[in-house]
Image: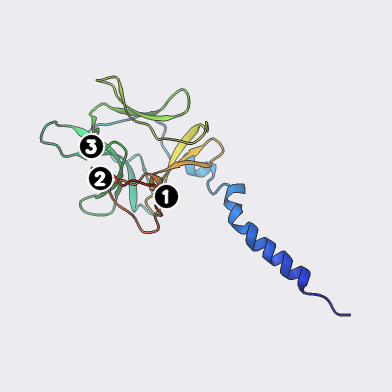
């Protein structure tokens, strides 16, 4: 009895068409990713290391000292190369508004990460999210992408979609993206 290969080909074709949808069905992140992040709030002060590092330690995220002749003790909320002699910033949240010492990055009561300047009682940075998902934690990936996860461990924001100082290997620029340099 001869069997037809047509049904097998159709199944394979259907599988190949559905394969790109798998990341939207299954989260690529887990609770373990969030457990690596210390409890916020984080305070900008000299001598404090990064909040989190990528798994391999190549990249770090935290307050990085900002060199300024006008004011002392200014910081950028940034991602930088972590294993170089002079850490190079590859992304910064608040490049146009350096954070003075004592500024705080925290998870607000409505579950949004916010960087505040307590002296001026002003918001220096807040990631622009789509929808009403509530932030849970930051994850620093080995490719240099900083990701914010929601309570179901789905990505709701990423630094690669808001490029500033450096384009990293593997980074894809979304349509209508504007590059910023500080």
Q: Earlier in the sequence, mark 2 or mark 3?
A: 3
At horizontal 28% and vertical 40% (from top left) the residue drawn is 49
Q: Earlier in the sequence, mark 1 or mark 3?
A: 3
Residue receiving disc 2: 181
Residue receiving disc 1: 175
Tag of residue 47: 3
Q: Residues within 10 Å of mark 2 (few under 14, many from 20)?
A: few
Choose mark 2 or mark 3, whichever is in front. Answer: 2
- Could you tell me how far apart the alpha carbons at marks 1 and 3 are, in whole angstroms? 39 Å
At horizontal 54% and vertical 35% (from top left) the residue drawn is 151
Residue 91 visible (yes or no) = yes
Given residues 68 and 139, the one toward you in this image is 68
- The answer to whether 110 appears left or right of 69 in the picture is right
User: Under tag 1, what secondary structure?
Assistant: loop
Choose mark 1 or mark 3, whichever is in front. Answer: 1
Confirm or deny contact between disc 1 and disc 3 (CB under 8 A): no
Q: Earlier in the sequence, mark 1 or mark 2?
A: 1
Confirm or deny contact between disc 2 and disc 3 (CB under 8 A): no
Q: Is residue 7 above or below residue 130?
A: below
Q: Is residue 150 above or below residue 172?
A: above
Confirm or deny contact between disc 1 and disc 2 (CB under 8 A): no
At horizontal 46% and vertical 22% (from top left) the residue drawn is 109
């Amino acid at each position: 009895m001869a069997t037809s290969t047509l049904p097998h080909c159709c199944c394979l074709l259907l599988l190949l068409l559905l394969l790109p949808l798998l990341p939207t069905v299954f989260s690529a992140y887990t609770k373990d990713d969030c457990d690596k992040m210390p409890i916020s709030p984080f305070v900008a002060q000299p001598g404090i290391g990064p909040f989190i590092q990528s798994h391999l330690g190549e990249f770090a995220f935290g307050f990085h000292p900002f060199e300024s002749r006008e004011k002392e003790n200014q910081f950028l909320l940034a991602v930088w190369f972590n294993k170089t002699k002079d850490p190079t910033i590859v992304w910064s949240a608040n490049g146009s508004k350096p954070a003075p010492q004592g500024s705080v990055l925290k998870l607000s009561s409505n579950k949004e990460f916010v960087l505040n300047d307590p002296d001026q009682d002003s918001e220096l940075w807040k990631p622009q999210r789509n929808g009403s998902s509530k932030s849970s934690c930051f994850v620093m990936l080995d490719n240099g992408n900083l990701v914010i996860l929601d309570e179901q461990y789905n990505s709701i924001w990423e630094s690669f979609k808001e490029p500033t100082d450096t384009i990293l290997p593997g980074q894809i620029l979304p349509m209508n993206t504007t590059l910023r340099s500080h």
